[in-house]
Each structure stands twice: as structure tokens, then as C-alpha cells.
Amino acid sequence: MSAEVKERDPLFSPKNRKLLSTPLNRDNPITVQVLGVCSALAVTAKLEPSVVLALSVVFVLGVGNVLISLLRKTIAPRIRIIVQLTVIATLVILVDQFLLAFAYDVSKQLSVFVGLIITNCIIMGRFEAFGMANKPWPSFLDGIGNALGYGWILIVVGFFRELLGSGTVWGYPVFEKIGLYNWGYENNGMMILPPMALIVVGIIIWVQRSRVRDLIEEN
Amino acid sequence: MQEVTSIFVKSIFIDNMVFAYFLGMCSYLAVSRTVKTSVGLGIAVIFVLGITVPVNYLIHEFLLGPGALSWLGPSFTDVNLNFLTFIVFIAVIASMVQLVEMIIEKFSPALYNSLGIFLPLIAVNCAILGGSLFMQEREYHSIAEATSFGLGSGVGWFIAIVGIAAIREKIRYSNVPAPLRGLGITYIITGLMGIAFMMFMGIKI
């Protein structure tokens, strides 16, 4: 959809496109900025909850950043934290009630992690760093970009953990259909357990930083 | 009483906030460079969790839960304000943190100087809101159970952050592959610590 708009819409200047694309790799919230790790890892044992949580964060961060940006001149600096929390909490309540109504099973699987979007540092972080200082449209792009950067890590981790841990993708038994079990393959039950999420993210960081050399930290 | 201690031990080792639920990871990764600061942050987390979980327990029990308003009169038994949970809990946490900060500043300047910078950070630490939300989801039966859950989770978080800080201080002398340095290796160590903590699973007290 966005490709269509891009061609005739000057709103997508190179600068604005950059807002959308840098958080996907070079300035990724999880692997570089270290924001929003909290709720990211626990839901990634399966692909479906990962995708649902990623979409929820896209919604909350995209809409929230615009709201904060519209309000930025009226918010007194002293009370900005509580205003930001109210905006986030309102949006998260909307998401939560929506999931309860239309995707009850997933909502049960996500348990407290929908609520934890509120304290997801990536959201407060973007409000503080971007929404409070910029116009609504760039804020929207920044919000969507960061949420997608967060989302793709979630989805990649969820994909590998479900594939290697349960041999399925989105509940579809891939390995069984290929007939891998007949050759003596066994699912790696370890992948379902929480600590493996951290190790998978560690490996993603490893791959990313070997490609983008200037992200490498001092010891 | 036995139930209370069992919840305490369980929330430190088995349902550890960091290793089992990844809560409070942001500050866990950001502040764990030296043991000294991580001890400060850990104590502040124990403190705040020990206060906010019981307070939110009371609010859930007498204001928000299904049928919680029945003490107002029979016509209120059907009222369910559960959808307000998030906004009320986060408001309680933010104001409790502010309150604790002011009280400490007044009565113990020394403690304030060591904890002060961490307290505002903690209002948006996922471990704190997570503690309250887990308390609500697991339906503890008394305020004693809720308090011991809060304190236990805090202690579990403390152990985790001090552990990782000690390891990170030592790992400076190791030859880590360049792209893994810093963040990457910290994730992997945390994963390994989590696997070690899984040994405690299934222990009953």
C-alpha cells in the first residue's frame, strides 16, 4: 500500500523514508537501542502470538506518537510522563478489549503481555525522543518504523522457535509433511523454553553486527 | 503461613521475573555494567514491588475485580470495572514511586542519594507493572500472599541483575568475538543463566 502512495506523494521525501527504514536495521529498537526487550521475548514461543503482539505495538506506537505530537505544545514538561502514560494506557486498553472480543485464544496466550505494552520502554522512549519534538507526520513514520523494527525481530524469533521447537509454522506441521520425522528427526523441546529466546536474539545480534561492522561495541 | 513462604521462594527461583518472564529487561541490560549500581537498582526494585503489589491487590480486591464493589450495596454486585485495570495500576505505580521518593528524601537522605536516581526509572520498569498484573492473574487469596509475591519477585530480580553485573565485570578480560561484544554476549549469558535457574523447576516447599 505504501509503495502506491510513495510515487505521487511528496510526503515521502528521502528524509521521511529514512525515518521509516533506519529503525529496521541500523537503529533497531531491540538489537541496538535496547528498548522494549521486556515484553518482546516471552511471547515468541509460537509465531501467532508474536505477530499479534507486533501488530498491537505498531498500532499503539503509530497512533500514540501522532497523538503526543499533536499535543506537544499543550503538555507542560513537568507532567509529561503522566500524560504519556495516560495516552499509552488508553490505546492499550483499546487493543486489549479488541483482542478479548475478536481473538480470545491469542489474548489468553499473551496474558499479561498486552498490558505490559504500557511499560514497554520503546513506546515511552519514542514519545520522549521523537513525538515531543516533531510534527505529526514524521512522528507517525517514526512510530511505525520503530514498531516494525521491533516487530520483525519478534516474528523472526517466533518463527525459528516454533519451527525448531514444535516443528510447525503458524500451527501447520511443516516437518511432518516433509516427512522429516521418518528420518529420525526429533523436535528440540529446549527451543520452547524461555531462555532460548534470549539466545536466539543473541544470535540475531551476532549476524547483524557481522554485517553492519560499525555497530560493534567496545568490550 | 506455609503457603506464604512457598510463594516467596517460588517467585525468587522458579517464576523469576528476569529468567522466566523477561520482565524489566531494559534496565537489566542497561544498568548491569557494574555491581555497585546494579545493587542500588535491585534494592529499589525490591522496595517498590513490595509496596505496589499489595496496594494494587487491595485496589483489585475492593474496586476493580468482578463483584469487587459489592461492599457498597447489593446493587453493585454486577459491576465489573476490570477494563480499567491497566490505567489504574500504572497510575498507582507512578504515584507510589513519587511518594516513596519524597518520603525517602525527607527521612533518609543517605538512602535517597544512593537510590534516588533509580526511582523515577523504576516507574516504567516492566517488572513492576508485571508484578501487579501477575498478582491479578494468579488470584492470590490474601494480602500476605500478595506481599510475599511482590517481595519475592523483587529479590529474584535483584539476584539476577547482581549476577549478570558480576559476570559482565569479569567478561571484560575475555576474548569475545567482536560482533557479539557488549549486548550480544549479555543476551546469551542471560539465556544460560536462565537455563541454570530452570533446575529449580518442580521443587516444592
Image (tube, coloured by chain):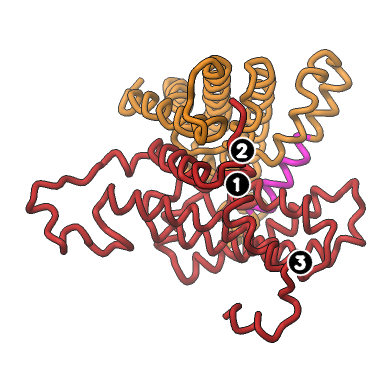
- Magenta highlight on residue A70: no
Image location (x, y in percent) of residue A168: 26, 58
- Magenta highlight on residue B89: yes
Please name the residue shown 78% across and 59% down the image. A131
To which quarter of the image does residue B127 belong?
top right
- Secondary structure, mark 3, is helix
Check disc 1 and give the amino acid type: Gly
Q: Residues within 10 Å of mark 3 (few under 14, many from 20)?
A: many
Q: Which residue is mark 2?
A: B26
- Magenta region's main secondary structure? helix
Q: Which residue is mark 3?
A: A138
Residue extent of the magenta highlight: B85-97
Disc number for residue A36? 1
Q: Is residue B120 above or below residue B10?
A: below
Q: Is residue B68 visible?
A: no
Tell me if A35 is positioned left or right of B22 in this view. Answer: right
Is the residue at mark 3 from the same chain as the one at mark 2? Answer: no
User: What color is chain A drawn in?
Assistant: red
Confirm or deny contact between disc 1 and disc 2 (CB under 8 A).
yes
B47 or A198: which is nearer to us? A198
Image location (x, y in percent) of residue B177: 47, 29
Please name the residue shown 16% across and 45% down the image. A186
Q: CA distance from mark 1 to mark 2?
A: 7 Å
Check disc 3 and give the amino acid type: Pro
